[in-house]
Amino acid sequence: MKKALHGVSVWYSNAVTQLRIARESDFDALELLPEHLFRYLDNGGSFAAYTALMDQLGVEISCINALKRIGRHQPEERAQMLAEADRICHAAQQLRCPVVQIMALTELDQLSEEARNEILVSNIRAIADIAKPYGIKRQIEVVAFTRFNSLSQALAIIQRVERDNVGLVIDFWHLHAGGRTTPDEVANMDVSLIYGIHFCDGRAAHPGEAWDEWVQRDYQPGEVDVDIPAWIAAVRATGYDGVWCPEQLSPTHWEDDLWQIGRDNYQSLTAYTA
């Protein structure tokens, strides 16, 4: 098992500090947010300096997370999305990062399922084709509070896309809170389509409550609704042996000491997966 610190767990930090937190918390890798990477590059940083620090600390970049709103389909906004896709892929190649995450948010929720799927297939094909020359894979994350939120939907899209560099991240909270995927479905999937694991807890929105990740995910593993052992067992049943990444999207814990967050994330992951 390779373990990666998630950049969202240490949201109020920068790309350089995150490498050091990862190393000093015993992580092998960092799942880096483009917001943090591009802020670093836009303010005097360079790929050469960053990769030198990666090598010095012995920390890989396992994933850049994420290209968002991949359902953009009006000509101008789609062109902008594809330009973003290319920029992130170039960055991933420079950082020797094998995977870029992609995700639709609510931009397609008003459409029929047929129309939504046509756009997703077309856009993911284009995004995958941009990634191919860079040697980059794309991992789809289905998002709990959208209408594209189940494992079965994602697998159906991947089958239609027909690209060998498109797979999935298995995110415990998104699959649990979306309410339409069971651990058994994960246990029975093709392991070659699993590119990463997001280890996390949380709950679905209560009836009448607005979806807000900063509320529904503001928990430590084991504090609320996700049956973490069941999801871990499901992943292990596939034979997956790649990157596991604890993701703590928690405004409460973002105010903790950054190194304590890193240690807590590592210790929680290792305690559950020992």
Image (spheres, rainbow, N blue to C red):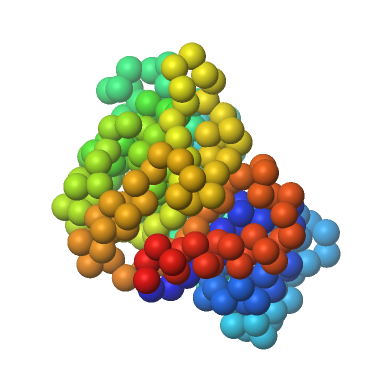
Q: Left of 270 or right of it: where is 14?
A: right
**Based on the displayed image, in which of its 4 quarters is residue 95 positioned?**
bottom right
Question: Is 82 situated above or below 53?
Answer: above
The residue most toward the left is 188
Measuring from the top left, give residue 71's x and y in whole percent. 45, 32
Report the number of discs: 0
Front-lying residue, 250 or 12:
250
Which quadrant of the figure contains the N terminus?
bottom left
In this rendering, the answer to whether 161 lies above or below 243 is above
Pick the residue in front: 229 or 142.
229
Q: x, y percentage for residue 23?
A: 62, 76
- Residue at 73 percent across and 68 percent down: it is 16
Q: Residue furthest right?
A: 44
Q: Where is residue 166 in the image (x, y as percent from the top left)?
A: 34, 53
| Quadrant assignment, res 229 | bottom left
Left of 97 or right of it: where is 156? left
Tell which of 49 and 145 is nearer to you.
145
Q: Nearer the viewer, residue 262 or 115?
A: 262
Residue ID at (69%, 79%):
53
Q: Is residue 234 visible?
A: yes
Could you tell me residue 227's position as x and y percent? 34, 46
Residue 140 visible in the shown view: no
Q: Is residue 49 above or below residue 140?
A: below
**Residue occupying the point 52% across, 25% down:** 211
Q: Residue at x 37, y 71 (%)?
A: 274
